[in-house]
Image (cartoon, coloured by chain):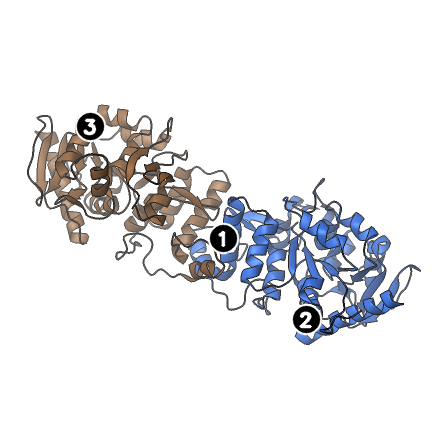
Chain colours: A blue, B brown
C-alpha cells in the first residue's frame, strides 16, 4: 500500500476553498506523491474586477503550493508590493479589493489566456507550472459559477459581501447557480479517487459550491473508498472567516458536530479538533479527534500525515 | 480678439495621435485658455490586452498634459516601475507590449469604468480629472474603431504591426472601419470650433482614423474658419515612427509637400519645417514655414504660439 519512495499508493482528491483548505493541501502535498494528490478548488468566489478574472481560492492554493503565499495575511503573495494599487487609489479607482503588484500579474496572465480562448482549467495549469506546483490544481468548473449571498441587506455578490462588507450582513441563504458542470479534468480525477477529503473550509461558501457542480457530489457518493471531512470549526469558532457566524445565522449550532451532521450522508470519516466535545452521533461515520489547528508548516504536515495514516488504516482493515 | 487674461479668444480643436500630437497639444495648452482648447484623439490603435482596454494615444496626451509623461521614451509614465511586467514575464505571459506599473493603473481604472457601463469619453474624463488635465480630452468615438494594416505579411491588427512587429511589415493599405460615429462631445466641440489643427501625427494611422469617424471630416470641411495642418515630415523624414516609411510604401514621396497634397481639400494653412523645400502648389492654401521640431518644452510653446498668432492674423485679415 506504499510506493517504493514510501508514499502511500492511494489517490487523494481534496475539495478546498481558500486559506484553511490551502494549509491542509500544503501538508498533504508533503506526504503524498504529486500524482497522488489532486485539488478541486472552489471558483464560486471568482469575480470580474477591473476587467480581469480574479480567482481568489485558486490563487491562494497555487501560491501556497508554490511557496509564494503571504503567511501573515493568509491571502496574496509574499514579498508583495502595492505600486499599482496605490496609483489606482490616486486615480479614484475602487480600492475595496486589495491587489498587489505580483498578485495582479497572475490575474493579468489568466485574463489574457481566457481572452485567447483557454479554459479556466488550462489557464490555471499554465500558471501552476510557472509556480512549480506539481499537483493537478483543478477549478471545479470551466463555467462561471458565482455564489450569491441573500442577506439582510439584499442579494449580494460574494465578494461584495465577503470583502467589501467584511461578511457583516446577516446571511439568510447562500444561493448557488443551477446546471454548472464539472470540467473533464475534475471528472477524471474523481473517477480514480481512493480518498476524497473535504478540507477545513467554509461548508456553505467553499465546499457546497464545489459539491453543487454536477456530477461532483454524485461521484463522491459513489466512487472513493473513503470520504474524510475535516472540521473548520475548532472550539466552537472558525479559525478564520465567517463559518461560525454563518452557522448561527442559518439556524445551526456552531460546532464541529453540526458540521459533521451537515455533511452526514457523504462522510465515512470526520476529523475534528481536540478542543471540541467528542461526539459520534452517526453510526456510519468514524469520528476522529486530533489537533487540527495549523499554525505552522509542521502542523500542516502533522495533520496531513494523520489523515493519510487514518485512511491507510481504514482501507486496509 | 484676446481675452482679459491675454489668451486669444478663439476655440481651437486639435486632431492628434500619439507622441508628435501630444507635444503640439502640450504647447497649445500653454498659450490657450483651457476652455478654448479641445483635443480629439485617435482611438484606432486602442486594443484589448490582458482583458484590459488600452488606449495608447489617449494616454500619451493625458500623461503629457498632466505633466506625467516619460520624456525619454515618448510613451508611458515618468518615474515608472516594472514590477508587474517582470512578474508577467516570469509567468510566461506576453511581453511584446510593455506595461509599467503606473501606466497599468490607468488601464485598470478605465477598464473598470467601461465594465460598469461608462462610455470611453466618460472614462477618459474621469482619468483626465485625476491627471489634472483642464482641457476637453475627447476620444474620437465611443465605439471601438480598430485600424487594420494590410501588409506584405497579411492583415495585421494595428498594435501587432506597430509594436510587436516594430512597423517593419510593408504596408499595402490601411483599413479603417465603416460606420463609426463620433461621440456627442466631439460633435459639440467641432460645432463651435474657430480653428481646427491637424497635429504633426501620422496622416494614415493617426489623423485619417479620426477623419474617418462620421461626421468629423464633414464638420471640419464646413465649420471652422481655419483648418491648419502641421507637417509630420521634417527634412524628408518622420521625427519618430513610420510616417515616412509608409508614404514610400503607399506610393507617395516622403515630403512635407506630399502631406499637404494628401490633406489638400481640408486645408486652409499648412505649416512645415525650415528644413524642407518651400513649396506652394495649391493656391487655396497658405504655406507657412517655421521650426516645427519640438525637442523641449520651449519648442512646443514656440510652435504653438506661432500657430495661434498665424490663426489670429489670418482670421483678422
User: Disc 3 is attached to a residue of which chain?
Assistant: B
Mark 2 and mark 3: Cα distance apart in space: 73 Å
Q: Which residue is mark 2?
A: A30
In this view of the protein, which residue sits in the foreground, A257 or B76?
B76
Looking at this view, name the residue that lies furthest to the bottom.
A298
**Label whose residue precedes the other's in the sequence (2 or 1):** 2
Q: Which residue is mark 1?
A: A108
- Is label 2 or label 1 in front? 2
Residue B215 vertical position relative to residue A314 in the rendered view, above or below: above
Per the image, label 3 sits on a secondary structure element best described as: helix
- Which picture quadrant has residue A86? bottom left
In the visual, does A119 lie left or right of B59? right
Residue B95 vertical position relative to residue A299 in the rendered view, above or below: above
Mark 1 and mark 3: Cα distance apart in space: 43 Å
- Checking the image for residue B266, the label placed there is 3
In the visual, does A43 lie left or right of A116? right
In the visual, does A283 lie left or right of A131? right
- Report x, y in % for residue A310: 82, 69
Amino acid at each position: 500500500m506504499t510506493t517504493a519512495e514510501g508514499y502511500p499508493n492511494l489517490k487523494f482528491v481534496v475539495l478546498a476553498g481558500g486559506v484553511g483548505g490551502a494549509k491542509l493541501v500544503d501538508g498533504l502535498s508533503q506526504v503524498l506523491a504529486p500524482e497522488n494528490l489532486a485539488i478541486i478548488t472552489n471558483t464560486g468566489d471568482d469575480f470580474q474586477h477591473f476587467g480581469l478574472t480574479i480567482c481568489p481560492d485558486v490563487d491562494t492554493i497555487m501560491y501556497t503550493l508554490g511557496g509564494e503565499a503571504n503567511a501573515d495575511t493568509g491571502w496574496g503573495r509574499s514579498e508583495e508590493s502595492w505600486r499599482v494599487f496605490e496609483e489606482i487609489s490616486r486615480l479614484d479607482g475602487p480600492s475595496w479589493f486589495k491587489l498587489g503588484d505580483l498578485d495582479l500579474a497572475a490575474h493579468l496572465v489568466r485574463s489574457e489566456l481566457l481572452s485567447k480562448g483557454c479554459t479556466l482549467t488550462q489557464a490555471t495549469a499554465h500558471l501552476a507550472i510557472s509556480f512549480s506546483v506539481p499537483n493537478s490544481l483543478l477549478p471545479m468548473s470551466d463555467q462561471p459559477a458565482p455564489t450569491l449571498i441573500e442577506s439582510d441587506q439584499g442579494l449580494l455578490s460574494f465578494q461584495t459581501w465577503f470583502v467589501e462588507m467584511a461578511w457583516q450582513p446577516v446571511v439568510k441563504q447562500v444561493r448557488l447557480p443551477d446546471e454548472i458542470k464539472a470540467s473533464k479534468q475534475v471528472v477524471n480525477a474523481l473517477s480514480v479517487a481512493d480518498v476524497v477529503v473535504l478540507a477545513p473550509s467554509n461548508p456553505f461558501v467553499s465546499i457546497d459550491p464545489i459539491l453543487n457542480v454536477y456530477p461532483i457530489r454524485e461521484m463522491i457518493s459513489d466512487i472513493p473508498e473513503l470520504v474524510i471531512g475535516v472540521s473548520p470549526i475548532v472550539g466552537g469558532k472558525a479559525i478564520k472567516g465567517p463559518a461560525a457566524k454563518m452557522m448561527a445565522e442559518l439556524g445551526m449550532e456552531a460546532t464541529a458536530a453540526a458540521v459533521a451532521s451537515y455533511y452526514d450522508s457523504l462522510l465515512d470519516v470526520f476529523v475534528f479538533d481536540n478542543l471540541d466535545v467528542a461526539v459520534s452521533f452517526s453510526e456510519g461515520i468514524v469520528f476522529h479527534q486530533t489537533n487540527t489547528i495549523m499554525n505552522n508548516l509542521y502542523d500542516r504536515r502533522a495533520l496531513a500525515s494523520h489523515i493519510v495514516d487514518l485512511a491507510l488504516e481504514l482501507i486496509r482493515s
